[in-house]
Image (cartoon, helix red, strand yellow):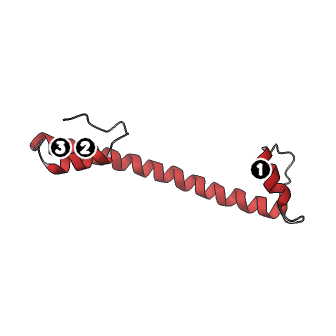
Amino acid sequence: MKQLISATLSEGAAIVYNGWEKQQKSKILSELIVKEDYNRKLVLDQQEDMKAMRVAISSAMIALHLKDPQHPLCKQLNKLLEGTIYYQYWD
């Protein structure tokens, strides 16, 4: 088991931390660190998955657009990419 040597908490975090039951602070903090590390890794993995999906949607949309620019699926797929670097500025 490692000991926490020092920590600087924001004012809001200090209020929450000081509200925890004595003798439970280390346990709660340890659980939060482990849980949030898992959540952080999960979010990073999901961001990578989203990027891969956007690339695939963009590729499919461009291929479809080259065959039939008026196909309604082109606009639908492009709308899914709005706000990303993969969005196409077609009329």
Q: Which residue is mark 2?
A: 59
Tag 1 near tag 3, CB within 8 Å: no
Which structural element holds mark 2?
A: helix
Sequence-wise, the earlier of marks 1 and 2 is 1
User: Which quarter of the rendering shows the C terminus?
Assistant: top left
For discs 1 and 3, the disc positioned in front in the rendered view: 1
Q: Which residue is mark 1?
A: 13
Rendered residue at 82%/50% (across/down): 14
Q: Is residue 88 above or below residue 1?
A: above
**Real-space Cα distance between discs 1 and 3?**
51 Å
Tag 3 near tag 2, CB within 8 Å: yes
Which structural element holds mark 3?
A: helix
Left or right: 62 as drawn, with respect to 56: left
Which x, y percent locates residue 22?
Answer: 89, 64
Rendered residue at 49%/52% (across/down): 45
Q: Which residue is mark 3?
A: 63
